[in-house]
Image (tube, rainbow, N blue to C red):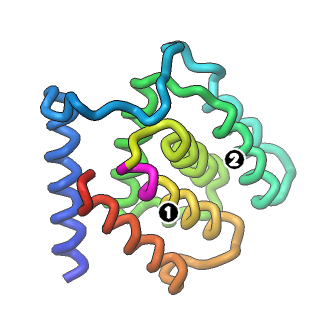
Amino acid sequence: MKEFIFMLSFLMYTFNTLMIYTGGGGDVSPAVSIQDETPSFAWEEQIDHIANNQQSPKEKAAAVEKLAKEYVPTTEELEEFKVYVLNEFLNLRYLDDSSNDKYMLSGIFQAIALEHHDLDLLRDFAKAFYHNTKNVYTGVTKPGSDSVLKYEEQMFESINAGY
């Protein structure tokens, strides 16, 4: 049954992505207006720097949260972030390598950027993705726990509600 739900969610995601890219979703606009189409800074370099320092995962996650909230993504980056977090979730990879600082921090960064700058429909998904990624990365919870499963259910509900 879970595989069926994953497949259905993936098909809905693919359909909606095609609608947006082909103009079928033309009435959809970002919740926050992005006027400067130049990224505010090279976020990947900042993530590398944070990932390679000697801080604890909690300190690294806090630094990335701050960084993501200050970042002003381009419209193109928001689309890339959206595709990335949805694909990582639907392919069940997003919690697989919790010891990989750069991977986990990148997921946290992109989810926060989406939560703060993108469509209302994706906001709930991004927030749940962020919570699971952060909580597993910092050791608060483990993949498969009740908390993780609850957030995953919220992500599926967000996908099935219209994204």
Instruction: Let me know if residue 123 is in the magenta part.
Output: yes
Q: Is residue 163 above or below residue 129?
A: above
- Residue 65, numbered circle: 2
> Which three-letter amino acid code belongs to the residue tagged 1?
Ala
> Which span is picked out in magenta?
121-125
Report whether 61 appears left or right of 12: right
Q: Quadrant of residue 98?
A: bottom right
Instruction: Let me know if residue 112 is in the magenta part.
Output: no
Residue depicted at x 48% and y 82%: 144
Q: How many marks?
A: 2
Q: Is residue 48 above or below residue 1?
A: above
Q: Position of residue 142 (x, y in %)?
A: 59, 78
Q: Quadrant of the N terminus?
A: bottom left
Q: Residues within 10 Å of mark 2 (few under 14, many from 20)?
A: many
Residue at the farthest right position: 54
Residue at the farthest bottom position: 146
Residue depicted at x 60% and y 44%: 109
Report how far apart the C-alphas of labels 2 and 1 lie in the structure. 14 Å
Q: Position of residue 69 (x, y in %)?
A: 66, 39
Residue depicted at x 69% and y 75%: 140
Is the magenta region chiefly helix, strand or loop? helix
Q: Secondary structure at mark 2?
A: helix
> Which three-letter amino acid code belongs to the residue tagged 2?
Glu
- Give the labeled residue for mark 1: 128
